[in-house]
Image (spheres, coloured by chain):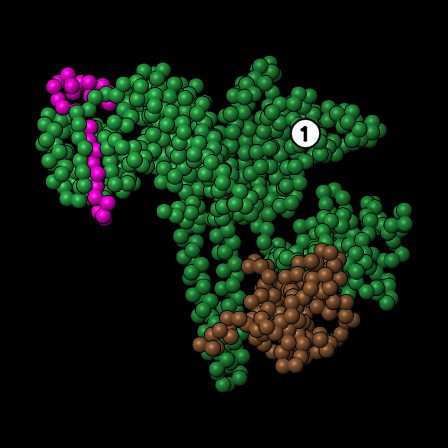
Amino acid sequence: MDLSQYLEMFIDETKEHLQNLNDQVLVLEAEPDNIDTINEIFRAAHSLKGMAGTMGFKRMQRLTHDMENVFSEIRNGKMSVTPDLVDIVFKCLDAIEEYLDCIINTSDEGENDNEELINMLNACLKAEGAPEEAKPAQPEVKEETKPEEDGDKRKFLHIDIADFEKNAITEAKAKNMNVFGVTVYIDESCILKAARAFLVFKGLENKGEIIKSVPGVQDIEDEKFDFDFSMLIISDKSLEEIKKIISNVSEIKEVVIENYEIPNNVEVVSSVQKEEKAPEKEEVKKKKAAPAKSGKPVANRSVRVDIEKLDVLMNLVSELIIAKNGLVSVSNQEDSKTSMQSFNEQIEYLERITTNLHESVMKVRMVPIESVVNRFPRMIRDLSKKLGKEMELIMTGEDTELDRTVIDEIGDPLMHMLRNSADHGLEPTIERLKLGKPQVGTIQLNAYQDGNNVTIEVIDDGAGIDVEKVKASAVKKGTITEEQAEMMSEKDAIDLLFRPAFSTSEKITDVSGRGVGLDVVKNKIEGLGGDVEVSTKLGEGTKFTVRLPLTLAIIQALMVEVRQEKYAIPLNSIVTIEDVSVHDIKYVQQKEVINLRGTVIPLVRLDEVLDCSPREEEPENLVVVIVKKGDKQTGLVIDNLLGQQEIVIKPLGKYINIHRMISGATILGDGEVALIIDSNALV
Amino acid sequence: MDENTVVNESKQYIVVKLDNEQYGIDITFIDNIVRMQQITRVPKAQSYFAGVINLRGEIIPVMSLRAKFGLPDKEYTNATRIIIVKPESNAKIGVLVDEVREVVALEEDNIEKAVYEEQGSNLLGVGKYNDTLISLLNIQGVIQDLDNA
């Protein structure tokens, strides 16, 4: 069966289940007796197992299966939740995530068996004296595909039985009941195998108890077996009777039935050996298949859309059609005066629709920030354990929505900042107590919408940034000189943190402190059109503020003219627009600068950098657009201002080489294409 | 029956003109042919790119075949056309030509394969059609070796 069409769905749902599991296990850690949570975990693990099984990801299936076993025991009250167990479960979740990543990239689960984790899980089961020994799912799977040339039709001999089943068998024998091993072969021409199998089970139901079947009952119902299945039955009826009941079902080719004895150890060993061989073969097969696949992720990115949003879109589109029809009928009108008037009406109508349409489409692209931040509680918990610091994460505004493209990119920077706060920001617990601070450190993650921006704050109540220490460290590294350090304002010093390869932490931990952190954060956020700010108070804590645009695709821009060509400059980078007399231009190192209210600002002649034909006559006054990148400002000399406009950013297409200073293009109202200037490249 | 075999062996080409030379472009790569429209210059792009155009809301780079082949610039006329070529499924590029003449079907027998050493990778070969010669463009080659040009 070709499962690739389900792969995307599988990935989405697995992600959801994993997130759910992470959340629930966190709750479980806080309240180990919460039965609702345990049930929820069990259900999620079960669904994961089922899905992995359906998709043929056997390693993943096996791991989730064992997890499910553990929680089944907990649910039945036979085991209790211990911190160790929670740790192991978290590790399992990580392992499943690894499988998932692998699947996303190669559509294959990879070759890590995670044997260690499975053993740990099983050890937990055993340690608690649970009667059920976790049985690996793999032998079962192998069972059904084993070729018939085995010679032995008594396939039931290969059924792996767990301890409790052994107990049941011994008990039954003690009660003088018969235990039969049965293997049923269904006619190969049979179409409804599952139905026949069902009839067999139904017939046997009244005569005895089926303690085990291979494949499992569920799989048989789903027709996940070849043309035979095996089972163990405890019954007080005779062998012949049972055989007759089964043979009475039509399209049954053969019934092999025998008194069943619990297999001795030798057989168990041999089946273990076979087990080991099977994965090897699989691996070889998979290795062959792997190189053919490209490095691109197999699954496409998708957005889940609220059906209501789609309904709104649908409505708008139908209105659009009505508006178009309106225009057609107007054009058919003969009286030119009335037609002009209704034409204008129709245009207004159309305008309203397109505005709404634009808004709705933007909404469809918006995703709550929750999808990014919901993995952070788990991360903070792990960090707390790893660093030996007590801390808690308080999140607000998880429902704040951002454009999908921004959401995809923002996760890593945020994670970096949180790690930073946890590692460098918060003091060790002992120190906190000494300082008279609450024992548990707090990290806040707040998100809220602020006009056309979304603001995300990461606040910790830790030690704050020691500005002197930052300066000293910078001097030591040679980033700045001592004189510079003395002159430096507090704000400038803090900005040093965002320089590449800068870390004030003396110790390098594997949490953070390698000095590759904050500059990457800053770059990424600026790449998204946002900015980062830090404010800190020594001894009281640090606050990182990230501001991001709501969407990337549509921006406000200033339209300018250079010679006959039109260009767009993003409004968010513009500080002011000035009229500058040519006489006010000064020269510093042969470069043109102006002195604007005490600030010296270099000038860039846009016509020169854009290779325009030179102006015949230099005017007395130049129009200068002052743009900023961080604290640096530059004046762009243009010819004319055309006004402010909302523009849609479009890529310039393949094949053409594009200079860094052009970030894209947009289509103006008259259909003309205008290029967008990335002022960051010119500052 | 006869017709079928002919169709199977022949390929269709759009014949375009640059000065007096005729070039053939394999029709399977062609998405569209549009009239000359306003082209926005893109500074610092390769010299043979005339700029970008707006094709129904999509921005498409346009290269000038004249500039690419080192021919002098010529004023755009009423006959000037932009051929929208789709060398890959997800990318389009416009090719500026002086004139689009016709669509011809050329049979394998009428095509003389290019010897690569002599012709460079811009041409696939030369086709004979009604006593005229048509240079068959290797349109993917023309577009792809942009970096070396």
Q: Which residues are magenta?
A: A164-191
Chain for colour green: A
- Please tell me which residue is depicted at 57% across the width and 41% down the height of the picture: A410
Give the number of callouts: 1
Question: Which residue type carries mark 1?
Answer: Gly
Q: Per the image, is A107 magenta?
A: no
**Mark 1 = which residue?**
A515
Left or right: A198 as drawn, with respect to A517: left
Q: Per the image, is A187 magenta?
A: yes
Q: Residue A504 appears in which quarter of the rendering?
A: top right
Q: Is residue A66 visible?
A: no
Chain for colour brown: B
- Please tell me which residue is depicted at 55% across the width and 59% down the height of the picture: B89
Please provide percent x and percent y for residue B35. 63, 74
Q: Nearer the viewer, residue A122 or A187?
A: A187
Q: Is residue A586 visible?
A: yes
Please provide percent x and percent y for residue A398. 49, 39
Farthest residue to the bottom: give it.
A334
Position of B26 relative to A100 (above/below): below
- Please tell me which residue is depicted at 40% across the width and 53% down the height of the picture: A308
